[in-house]
């Protein structure tokens, strides 16, 4: 009998999920669903690290919505577990134990911590400790691979280092995980500024920054047609501008057509043709996801049953660790 690798990944229930989350995380999870044993988590405790951004009355509902989006994207609860982090108390318990073996300097070096704390007079300890809780999420389940977008690379390396350090001190207990990045779509850039990563927080103040997974087709087309490119007409990946490279990457991630082939097809044509084709592909991909999402939202009992079954399943593994 072959032993399947176990995958674990998580998404924070803050803000609206966007095309970057979909192409960097959710879609690759679905693609590899059969090849692995999968555990997918809505990490509500991580959302608390920026308390100003959390409405406590909204957090539980928002977490359910993200779980419903996982399922709508194609995660099959028969083959994968989908649950909410705070419902399994071992995440917090292991985080404490790992805190005690994690040198402070490792956390102070994290680029996400530096970016999120920059320019602020005071930040919560949780923000600094965020990667240790993430390490606990991963290490609780003897995870082999963590499928995420490129921005998580440093956090997964830290989880590995924490596991190795723990094992060095106490014997072989924790499995050091590996990262799994999608070949394209691992770093989707902002549509209004292709030099920065597409992100939920920027999207809150800049309407043309992102395409939300639940945006209606009209809005999706409008935002993509406005995507920033350049005044020329160059597609070859070595010379194309960042906005054009980003749009070709999005198309390639959705259709599996290699970027070189996309570039060759559009050579000599205006960017409007590329934008229109990207918009068609995004709408075609997201419309069925949105329809399934609406069905889960209409049937709270079904979603509750899925979450309960998964929670019971993963508690068994987490409790043993
Ligand atoms: P977050 O929204 O930060 O909770 O991220 C959830 C997942 O989406 C993680 O695996 C991220 O690496 C991934 N992700 C977030 N933004 C992007 C992006 N712009 N491009 C690709 N993947 C992303
Ligand atoms: N830090 C991740 C993000 O913002 C979310 C996350 C928390 C995660 N725990 C995890 C991702 C464990 C993978 C595995 O995207």
Image (spheres, rainbow, N blue to C red):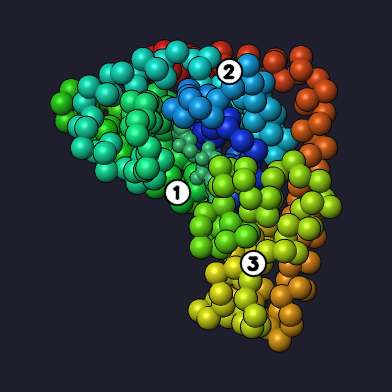
Q: Secondary structure at mark 1?
A: helix
Circle 2 residue = 56
Q: Secondary structure at mark 3?
A: loop
Q: Residues within 10 Å of mark 1 (few under 14, many from 20)?
A: some
Residue at screen point 36% across, 15% down: 93
* Residues at marks 2 and 3, CA–CA distance in whole angstroms: 36 Å
Specify the quadrant of the image occupied by residue 145.
top left
The residue at which mark 1 appears reads as 151
Tell me the quarter of the picture where residue 309 sits.
top right
In the image, is residue 115 above or below residue 312? below
67 relative position to 37: left or right:
right
The circle on residue 228 is 3
Q: Residue furthest bottom?
A: 268
Q: Measuring from the top left, give residue 170's x and y in whole percent.
A: 18, 23
Q: Position of residue 204 (x, y in %)?
A: 62, 42
Label 2 element class: helix
Q: Is mark 1 within 8 Å of ligand 1?
A: yes
Sequence-wise first label, 2 or 3: 2
Q: Residues within 10 Å of mark 3 (few under 14, many from 20)?
A: many
Whether 275 is drawn above or below 317: the answer is below
Mark 3 lies within 8 Å of ligand 1 (Cβ measured): no
- Residue 174 lies left or right of residue 33; in this view the side is left
């Amino acid at each position: 009998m072959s032993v399947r690798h176990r995958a674990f990944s998580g998404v924070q229930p803050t803000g609206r999920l966007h095309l970057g989350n979909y192409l960097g995380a959710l879609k690759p999870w679905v693609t590899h669903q059969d090849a692995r044993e999968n555990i997918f988590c809505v990490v509500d405790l991580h959302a608390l690290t920026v308390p100003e951004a959390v409405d406590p009355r909204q957090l539980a509902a928002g977490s359910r919505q993200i779980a419903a989006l996982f399922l709508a994207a194609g995660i099959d609860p028969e083959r994968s577990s989908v649950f909410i982090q705070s419902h399994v108390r071992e995440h917090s318990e292991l985080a404490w134990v790992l805190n005690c073996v994690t040198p402070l300097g490792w956390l102070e070096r994290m680029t996400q911590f530096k970016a999120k704390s920059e320019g602020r007079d005071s930040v919560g300890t949780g923000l600094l400790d965020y990667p240790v809780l993430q390490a606990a999420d991963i290490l609780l389940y003897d995870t082999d691979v963590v499928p995420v977008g490129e921005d998580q690379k440093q956090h997964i390396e830290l989880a590995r280092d924490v596991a190795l350090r723990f094992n060095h001190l106490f014997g072989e207990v924790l499995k050091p995980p590996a990262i799994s990045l999608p070949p394209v779509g691992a770093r989707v850039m902002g549509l209004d500024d292709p030099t920065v990563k597409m992100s939920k927080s920027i999207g809150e103040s800049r309407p043309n920054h992102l395409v939300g997974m639940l945006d209606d087709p009209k809005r999706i087309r409008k935002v993509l047609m406005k995507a920033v490119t350049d005044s020329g007409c160059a597609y070859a990946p070595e010379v194309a501008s960042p906005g054009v490279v980003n749009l070709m990457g999005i198309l390639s991630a959705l259709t599996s057509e290699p970027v070189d082939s996309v570039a060759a097809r559009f050579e000599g044509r205006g960017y409007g043709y590329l934008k229109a084709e990207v918009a068609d592909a995004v709408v075609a991909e997201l419309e069925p996801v949105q329809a399934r999402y609406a069905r889960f939202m209409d049937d709270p009992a079904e979603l509750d049953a899925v979450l309960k079954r998964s929670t019971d399943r993963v508690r068994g593994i987490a409790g043993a660790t």
